Image (tube, grey):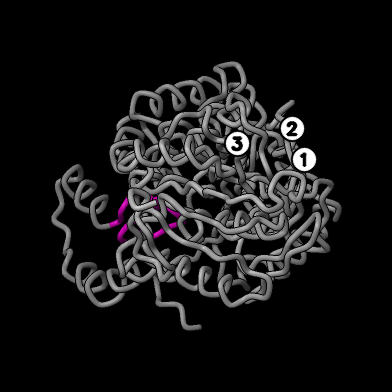
Amino acid sequence: MTIPDGLKIGVMVNGNELVGGMPQQEALARLFPDAAADSPVDLVRIACHVYEFEQALPAVTWLKERGYQVGFNLMQVADRTEDEVKALARLASAYPMDALYFADSMGSMNPGQVAQIIHWFRSEWTGAMGIHTHDNLGLALSNTLRALDEGVTWVDSTVTGMGRGPGNARTEELAIEIAARSGKSANMVPLMVLLREHFKPMQAHYGWGSNPYYYLAGKYGIHPTYIQEMLGDSRYSEEDVLAVIEHLRVEGGKKFNLNTLDAARHFYRGEPKGRWTPKERFARREVLLLGTGPGVARHRSALERYIRDKKPLVLALNTQSAIDAELIDLRVACHPVRLLADCEAHTRLPQPLITPYSMLPPDVRDSLGNKEVLDFGLKVQADSFVFKDKHCTSPTSLVVGYALAVATSGNASRILMAGFDGYSADDPRSREMHQLLEQYQDSEGALPIKSITPTRYGVQSESVYAL
C-alpha cells in the first residue's frame, strides 16, 4: 500500500482487546510490533466502554513511549451522571494521552447534551477533547458543530456519512462548515467527484444512513446493531422491526445482546424436542388458520358466523386479534424475537400458546412468565416438512410453516386459511410464502388447504360466504 505524502494514518483498537485474558503489554506488542517511526500508523485510538476504561489506560504510556499519538474514545457516556463523567476525566488526567474523545454511541444526544458532557469533562480534564457522533436523529453534524463551539478540537466525519447503520457526520458537510468558520474557501471539487464516482454507488449498494428505524433507536437509546441485524434479515417485516423496537424501549436495549437477536438464527439447531402432542386438540378437526392480513378484519362478520355455525378449531398466528377473542381457541408463535416483542401481549391474551417452548432462549421463556404454553418442538431444515407427534421440521422459521406442521402432526381433517392476502409481486416475502406453501402441499402427509378469504397465493380458494 502506498501512502500519499502528508497523509497520517490512524487506527482504532477495541478496549476489550487490551483488558482480556492476554497481558496488556503482550497484546499491544502483537498489535504494534514496531515503533511509530517504523510504522505506517501515526495515531492509535482506543475505543472502550466505561467499565473497561481504568484497566485500558496504561496502554497510553506504552504507546507514547514508542512514539505514537494516542487517543481514548469513551463509548456510551450519554446516560452517565455528572459525578461519573468527572471521575472518568480524573482517571484520564493521570495519563499523557493526546485527546480524550467521547462517542454518542446510540445517536441519541442533542447539542445541549453534548455541551453538558463537555463541561463535565472540562472540570477535570484540561487536554484536547474530541467527539464521535452518530446520525440516528439526523443530529450528527449539529452535535459536532456544537462540540466545536465548546472548544473541542478533534472531530470525526466520514464521506457521505459512511458507517455502520445510521452512519456518522458527513465529511462534505463538515468541510463546508469548518471552511465557513475559518473564513477560508474550500475546494470541494475533488471531494464531490469522489462522492459521485465511488461513495454514492457504494451507499446505494450497502444502504448506510439513517431511516425511521434508526431514528427510533436513537430516540429510545437502543443499540443500532439491533436495527442493522433486523434490516439485513428478510424474515423481519416492518411490523416485526417496530415490535422489537417497542420491546427494547421498555426493557432496555443499550447493550447489544446476541442472545436476543441471533437466537432467531441459531436456536432451532440440534434435534427438535417438545412435550405436547397436538393430536389432543386437532385430531379429525377442521382447522381455521387466521393470518395477519387485512382480509380477516374485512370479512370479520362472515368469518365469525362461520366459526359459530361450523365450530372449526380456530388457530391464530402470533397476536392476531381482528375477530372476537372468544372465538379463538389457540395461538401459535415460533420466532423468538417476535415472541420477545409480543410477550406482554401474549401474557394478556387468554388462549394457550403453541410454541417450541423448551427450545427457546431463556430470556424468551422468562418473558412469557406464567403463560399457558403447549410445547411443540421445531427444527428448521431447507426444503423439508416432517410431522411428528411432539415436534416437526419446517423449511423456514415463518410461523405459517410451523402452524401448518402443528395441524398436520395433530391429524386435523383439513386447513382453512383466512387473512393470507399476500404481498405485491415485487415483495421478497411473496416469493418466500409461495415457496413455503408449494413445499407444504408437495410434502408427504400434507392436509388439504383452502383459502376462504381473497389471496394471491397458489392455493385452492372458496369464499367464506359460499361456505
Q: Badge 1 is on which residue? A: 362
Label 3 is placed on what type of residue?
Asp
Badge 1: residue crowd in 10 Å (few <14, some 14–19, many ≥20): few
Q: Residue at x 52, y 48 (%)?
A: 288
- Range drawn in magenta: 158-171
Quarter-of-image position of residue 97:
top right
Check whether the beta carbons of the residues at disc 2 and disc 1 lie within 8 A of each other.
yes
Q: Nearer the viewer, mark 3 or mark 1?
A: 3
Q: Secondary structure at mark 2?
A: helix
Residue at mark 3 to residue at mark 1: CA–CA distance: 26 Å
Q: Residue at x 44, y 39 (%)?
A: 217
252 to 271, vertically: above or below:
above
Q: Badge 3 is on which residue? A: 329
Q: Would you say residue 389 is visible in this rendering?
A: yes
**Left or right of 114: which side holds 260?**
right
Label 1 is placed on what type of residue?
Pro
Residue 405 in picture, x, y percent from top left: 66, 60
Q: Residue at x 56, y 18 (%)?
A: 81
Q: Secondary structure at mark 3?
A: loop
Q: Badge 2 is on which residue? A: 366
